[in-house]
Image: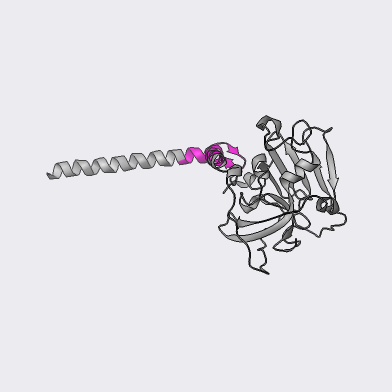
Amino acid sequence: MNNQRIKFRTMLCFLVLALGGALTYGLYTYAWRAPEVDGLPAPFRAGLEANAGFWKRFGGERKSAPRREPKPGEKFRVNGDVGLEGPVDEKTWRLEVRANDSDPAAKVLSLSMDDIRKLPRSMSSAEFRCIEGWSEPIAYAGVRFSDFVRILGLGGRNGQAPNFSGAKPEELYPYVALETPDGEYYVSLDMESMLHSQTILAYELNGEPLSADNGAPLRLVVPVKYGIKSLKRIGKIYFSNQRPRDYWAENGYDWFAGL
C-alpha cells in the first residue's frame, strides 16, 4: 500500500470520527435543551418510561423480590428523613384514605392504628434494595395491601373492591398514591405492584415495633420496587385514574423504580 493510499484512509477515518462526534454532540445538546417532563428533558424521560414498560412487562405479580431473612437482633438500616420532621403521637395519628382523589363525593376513611391492627396480620421477608446501590434483608409485618383494599372496599372504580384475582384492568384504578402527614414526601405506584403479595402496610420491622426513624407508626414496604417507593410514616392514601405526583420522579428518577 503506497503512502498516498495510507494518507487517504487516515483522513477518511478522521473525517468519520469528526462527523460522528459532531452528530453525538448535536443529539446530546438537543436532548438537554428539550422541554422538561417531571424534572428531566423529554428524551431522557421517554427513555425511562420505555425502561419502565419493559420491567413492568416482565415483572408484576410473576416476579417477587428474593426472600432473605435478617439475623436475629439485626437492626434495619435507617436511610432518608424527608417527611419525618417532628414527633408523631400514635394515639392521635390517623390514616386518611380517599377512594378517588378527583371525586369529592367518594368514600373517605379515617383510620387509627387500632383500626389497622384489627385487620389480618401478615408477615414476609425479602431483600430490600436501595437505589443508592446497597441492599439488606428485611422481615416485616402488618396488613397486606391487597387485604387492606379488599376488606375496606377500595380500589375499584365503582366504589367497591372488585375480585382482584379476576378483575379486568378497566375495573381498577391504575394508580395508588401515598403521602406523609406533612405532605413533604409522596410517592405513586402502579396498582399491580401495590397488590403484589409482598406489599405490606407495615408496623413491625425485623421482629420489633416500627421505630420513628423507620417510619412509625405505619410505613409501606414494597420489595419489588427500589426503596424510594417504600414511604415511611404514611398519612394519606388515595386512588387515581391519573398518575399522581412522585417525589423522586420530579427530581429526575425513574417513576416505575422496578427491580
Q: Tell me which residue sits at (76%, 41%) in the image.
A: 150
In the rendered image, the residue lying farthest to the bottom is: 73
In the rendered image, the residue lying farthest to the left is: 2
In the rendered image, the residue lying farthest to the right is: 92
Locate the N terminus by quadrant: top left
Q: Nearer the viewer, residue 254 or 105?
A: 105
126 lies above or below 236: below
Instruction: Classify residue 165 by image quadrant.
Output: top right
Instruction: Classify residue 57 by image quadrant.
Output: top right
The mark total stands at: 0
| Main SS of residues in magenta | helix
Instruction: Classify residue 73 by image quadrant.
Output: bottom right
- Residue 51, horizontal then vertical, whole percent: 53, 41
- Residue 145, horizontal then vertical, whole percent: 72, 46
Q: Residue 40: say if magenta.
A: yes
- Magenta-tinted stretch: 28-53
Figure colour scheme:
one colour
Q: Nearer the viewer, residue 136 or 231?
A: 136
5 lies above or below 143: above
| Left or right, residue 18 beside residue 152 | left
| Left or right, residue 41 beside residue 168 | left
- Residue 55, horizontal then vertical, whole percent: 55, 42
Q: Tell me which residue sits at (71%, 41%) in the image.
A: 176
Q: Residue 196: say if magenta.
A: no
Q: Tell me which residue sits at (72%, 56%) in the image.
A: 141
